[in-house]
Image (cartoon, grey):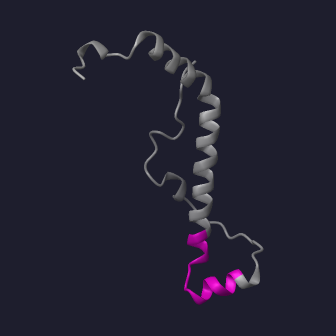
Amino acid sequence: MVMRIDYAHYPCGYLLMGARRAVNVSIRAELIDAARAEDINLSAALEAALTAQLRMRRRDRWLTVNEPAIKAYNSDVDENGSFGDHARGF
């Protein structure tokens, strides 16, 4: 089993780059009113929230896909030790 990190070599903020698209969303009126009263940029707030959700879901999916490999690696280290154990002085 091979562990793989998707997007590991993309520049930071890769998902935030690109063209923008206008979309319609439905949000509670009092929430919009409160956000506007605080001068919150709705587009930036939604982008930040979506980016965080995507990061969490991709992380969870990666962990699920790679769980067998992680367990196998940890088991191997438990049985055989880690590379360089012989050189450690602690």
Q: Is residue 40 magenta?
A: yes
The residue located at (47%, 55%) in the rendering is: 13
In terms of image quadrants, where is residue 44?
bottom right
x and y percentages locating residue 72 in the rendered image: 55, 17
The residue located at (65%, 33%) in the rendering is: 64
Location of residue 26 with respect to 11 vertically, above or below: below
Q: Which residues are magenta?
A: 31-45
In terms of image quadrants, where is residue 47?
bottom right
The residue located at (61%, 22%) in the rendering is: 68
Q: Is residue 22 magenta?
A: no
x and y percentages locating residue 50 in the rendered image: 62, 60
Name the outermost residue toward the bottom. 37
Q: In the displayed structure, does residue 44 sit left or right of residue 21?
A: left
x and y percentages locating residue 58 in the rendered image: 61, 43
Q: In the displayed structure, does residue 54 sit left or right of residue 27?
A: left
Name the outermost residue toward the front. 90
Helix, strand or loop for the magenta stretch, by majority = helix
